[in-house]
Image (tube, rainbow, N blue to C red):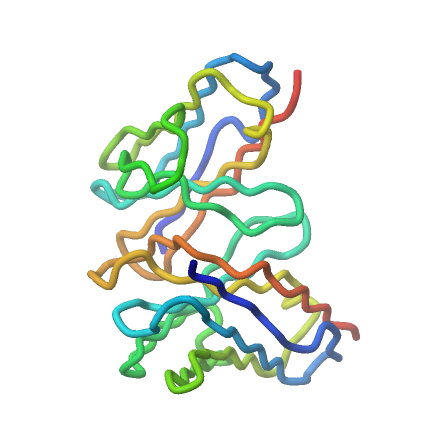
Amino acid sequence: DIQMTQSPSSLSASVGDRVTITCRASQNIYRYLNWYQQKPGKAPNLLIFAASSLQSGVPSRFSGSGSGTDFTLTINSLQPEDFATYYCQQSYSTPFTFGPGTKVDVK
Amino acid sequence: QVQLQESGPGLLKSSETLFLSCIVSGDSMSGHYWNWIRQPPGKGLEWIGYIYPTGAVNYNPSLESRVTISIDTSKNEFSLKLTSVTAADTAMYYCARERVAARPGGQFDYWGQGTLVTVSS
């Protein structure tokens, strides 16, 4: 199985901040990397697919980058509705695997 | 608007068999892979497996000996069967659609709201 790690595991930020979350894969997954946002009691929501493609309806303040084993999710100008947990997920091979999550909370 | 809705028993006893269904509305099941994903309380996400309308399946090896996913396109429904459950199977279970049919796939663009399954000993 491909192991996914994320850093940090949690961070505190303020509205308007730029937030960066890092994801690393245990092997080369090219650009088969997706990002999800999950709020308490809700299902995850696809934000970014194929490392940098913005899912329809997702605000442009979200962006993704990277390839190979190292990837980044950036949120420009954090909004109140962005406080949530973020997961990366590899879709290069089955079993599809997720990172442990990064919780973004209010500073 | 695509919608997925899970249904099934909320409480099971250890060693019993879990059956969950996912009803899909607002979309044809053809041309997409349909997945089950679970999340233990307070923990991360685990992919269980997928099925294509042809019946082709792929399971997580960690669960493969206990999992069966089936589909009934006439009812716009797919199902999960998990045998010999234990407390470790306690989780929120989600059904989800893959964005595209091209492989390797694995981009989950529509999810059900989830159904909590608790296994008691």
Choose top left, top right, bottom left or bottom right for residue A25.
top left
Q: Which is more toward the observer, B17 or B109? A: B109
**Residue A95 appears left or right of A104:** left
Q: Could you tell me residue B91's position as x and y percent?
A: 64, 62
Which residue is pictured at 60% across the width and 24% down the height?
A: A80
| A56 over B56 or under it: above or below | above
Choose top left, top right, bottom left or bottom right for residue A61.
top left
Q: Could you tell me residue A78's position as x and y percent?
A: 51, 19
Q: Could you tell me residue B33's position as x and y percent?
A: 33, 68
Which residue is pictured at 27% across the width and 37% down the height?
A: A53
Which residue is pictured at 42% across the width and 18% down the height?
A: A76
Choose top left, top right, bottom left or bottom right for residue B28.
bottom left
Task: Say which quadrant the N terminus of chain A sits in.
Answer: bottom left
Task: Say which quadrant the C terminus of chain A sits in.
Answer: top right
Residue farthest right in this picture: B121
Q: Could you tell me residue B84's position as x and y percent?
A: 62, 82
**Residue A7 appears left or right of A69:** right
| A48 over A96 or under it: above or below | above
